[in-house]
Amino acid sequence: MHETAAAPHDPPIPHDDARVQQNLALTADRLGDSTRAREHWQRYLTSMPAHCPAPPGDADYLYRLGEWVRRQLAGEAPTP
């Protein structure tokens, strides 16, 4: 049997670039397609650590970014 899913330690596949997934999620949101947006936000969360390095001196960046997306997915109001 051929496995197609990448193991957690494997490098992300190019089409799962978190930045692309974020843009696709935002676009789907703007178009009112919440189901598709949710799928892209989930893929964004999965690929985010590999594609979105934290700015220098901001150790909590990925955590805060992930929490913001999770709040969006839960339908909570965003916080600035």
Image (tube, rainbow, N blue to C red):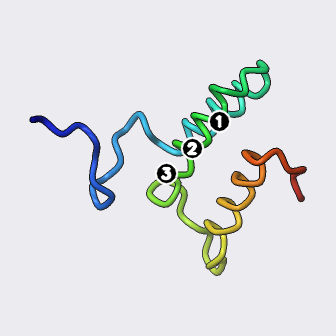
Q: Quadrant of residue 13?
A: top left
Residue type at mark 3 is Thr
**Residue at the image position 9 percent from the left and 35 percent from the top:** 1
Q: Which residue is mark 3?
A: 46
Q: Position of residue 57 (x, y in %)?
A: 64, 81
Asked whether the residues under the numbered discs 3 and 2 touch, taking CB atoms below 8 Å apart as contact, a structural biologist would say yes
Judge from the rendering whether residue 47 lies leftward or rightward of residue 60; answer left or right: left
Q: Earlier in the sequence, mark 3 or mark 1?
A: 1
Q: Position of residue 37 (x, y in %)?
A: 66, 31
Cα distance between the residues tagged 3 and 1? 12 Å
Q: Which residue is mark 2?
A: 42
Q: Quadrant of residue 73?
A: top right
Q: Nearer the viewer, residue 15 or 55?
A: 15
Judge from the rendering whether residue 80 lies leftward or rightward of residue 11; answer left or right: right
Helix, strand or loop at disc 3? helix
**Residue at the image position 28 percent from the left and 42 percent from the top:** 5
Which image quarter holds the C terminus? bottom right
Q: Position of residue 2 (x, y in %)?
A: 12, 35
Q: Which residue is mark 1?
A: 38
Relative to 57, say whether 17 is above or below: above
Judge from the rendering whether residue 77 lies leftward or rightward of residue 1; answer left or right: right
Asked whether the residues under the numbered discs 1 and 2 touch, taking CB atoms below 8 Å apart as contact, a structural biologist would say yes
Residue type at mark 2 is Gln
Residue type at mark 1 is Arg
